[in-house]
Amino acid sequence: MIGCTGVLVLGTRGAGGPGEVLVRVRGGSETFLAWSADPLPRGASVLVIDFRGSRQVDVIEWTDPLNASSGMAGGAG
């Protein structure tokens, strides 16, 4: 679970409470309660950095470096 990426389907509220993240695991997708140090909006890409048990994870905002560079190669041709 740690190291998986996902997308927030419900934004987090930092210390105010969890959101919900959709994570691709075990050949499918599952939702977990998502906790973060700072509030994150719905639709944000996140990285799972810790597992709290009981279907709860800690997340941070994540930008995939491979997707970020793919836009630069699209103009040739």
Image: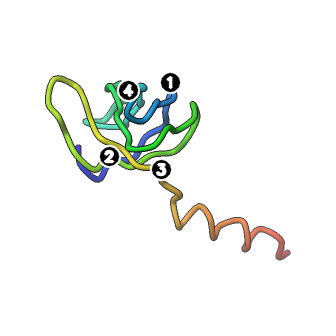
Between 48 and 40, the one nearer to me in the picture: 40
**Left or right of 4 on screen, residue 1:** left
Quarter containing the C terminus: bottom right
Q: The residue tagged with tag 4: helix, strand or loop?
A: loop
Mark-to-mark CA distance, 4 and 3? 14 Å
**Left or right of 27 on screen, residue 6:** right
Q: Which amino acid does label 3 sit on?
A: Glu
Nearer-N-terminus badge (4/3): 4
Q: Are marks 1 and 3 in contact (CB under 8 Å)?
A: no
Mark-to-mark CA distance, 1 and 2? 15 Å
Nearer-N-terminus badge (1/2): 1
Quadrant housing residue 76: bottom right
Which residue: 54% across, 66% down? 66
**Left or right of 72 on screen, residue 1:** left
Nearer-N-terminus badge (4/1): 1
Nearer-N-terminus badge (2/4): 4
**Which residue is labeled 1 in the image?**
10
Give the vertical position of 23 relative to 45 (above or below): above
Nearer-N-terminus badge (1/3): 1
Which residue: 57% across, 30% down? 42
**Which residue is labeled 2 in the image?**
48
Quadrant housing residue 14: top left
**Which residue is labeled 4 in the image?**
18
Mark-to-mark CA distance, 2 and 3? 9 Å
Between 31 and 54, the one nearer to me in the picture: 54
| Residue 13 coordinates in the image, percent (x, y) | 46, 30
Q: How many marks?
A: 4
Q: Which amino acid does label 1 sit on?
A: Leu
